[in-house]
Image (tube, grey):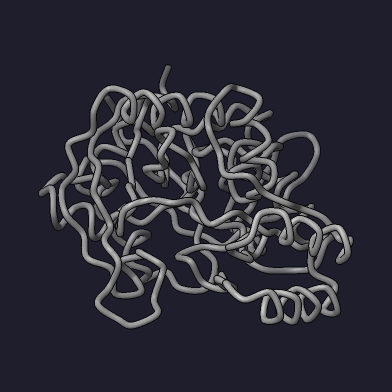
Amino acid sequence: MSNLLFGVVYHENINNWATANLIKAINDKGHVAKPFRLPDIAAQIPNRFTHLDEDVSDMDGVLVRTIGFGTGDQITYRISLLEHLEDAGIYVMNPAYSFRRAKDKYATLTALNKAGIRVPRTYIGENLEAAIEFVDEVGDVVIKPLIGARGMGAIRAEHKELTYRAMKFIHQLGQVLYVQEMVSKPDRDIRAFVIGGQLVAAMYRYLPDVEGEWRTNVHGGGRAEVAELDDEYKECAIKTAEVLNLDYTGVDILESPEGPSVIEANAAPSWSALSRVTNIDVASLIVDRLVQQSTR
């Protein structure tokens, strides 16, 4: 196979661990990595794309790590740009619609629930009174940003008065209220990594030894350990990736009393802790999938 040209979409930091890992894997396999930011790409109709002054219309595939931050118009343009690349015959991974849907927790849970995958009971909306009624009924909840990563911005509000104040503040900022029941579970959750419809690895993420901390994210101090999942949990992770049409994803699963409950499927997950505890070269497997999809 001749050398292929792959765009790698980053936003502010090209030296981000996962981005750098993917660029290295592409180059190590004898292909060419072209890192770029979506704001630096210009499109013309019909199908021509330029990165600054360079024509990049001959890219074989594009690996998306982020669409970055921006105004409504900027984000709309970048998503449309990814769709334009797909229409021009350039494989985008994860696909534009799948990436957008997975970044949106509301859209993710709606799709999974429709497919029969268990998800926590959740309120989403802009009506503060309705959100308060939900909390009164459910009790212990977590308030999350609609779009976010690594558990950042999530608030566990066990007391009614603190919950009300947090939601009122979020509402006054003009943000959507995303309020989720706190699922009864062990002091850990599961990150299952799926590539090309196959479960390649999984790990438990245990609560950090910090008083009052309820998040298991390794980035926030949680402890990672290899997980051997039973068939029910394996099937849950694989079906989640299939429903969302994600070439690769890190699926976050809770061990609820009723069985696996999915809280998120990451469209651009990191895997540093996973690689460390499993010794699996995740970046190499992701690039193999990119090559496969771009040359089929």
Q: Nearer the viewer, residue 46 or 255?
A: 255
Q: Is residue 212 left or right of residue 203?
A: right
Q: Nearer the viewer, residue 288 or 119?
A: 119
Residue drawn 37% across and 36% down? 4
Residue 190: image location, x then y, percent = 32, 47
Image spot of residue 272 (x, y percent): 25, 60
Relative to 221, does residue 118 appear above or below in the rendering? above
The residue lying toward the viewer, choosing from 241 and 191, is 191
Quadrant into which the C terminus falls: top left
Q: Nearer the viewer, residue 295 or 270?
A: 270
Residue appearing at x 73%, y 68% in the figure = 70
Q: Residue 260: where, in percent of width, then height? A: 41, 35
Within the image, what quadrant is residue 167 found in?
Answer: bottom right
- Residue in the picture at 10% in, 49% down: 279
- Residue at 54 percent across and 67 percent down: it is 11
The number of discs equals 0
Looking at the rendered image, the quarter that the N terminus falls into is top left
- Side (left or right) of 4 relative to 95: left
Q: Position of residue 180 (x, y in %)?
A: 62, 55
Identify the image quadrant of residue 225. bottom left
Q: Residue furthest left?
A: 279
Whether 203 is drawn above or below 291: the answer is: below
Q: Is residue 39 above or below residue 125?
A: below
The residue most toward the top is: 296
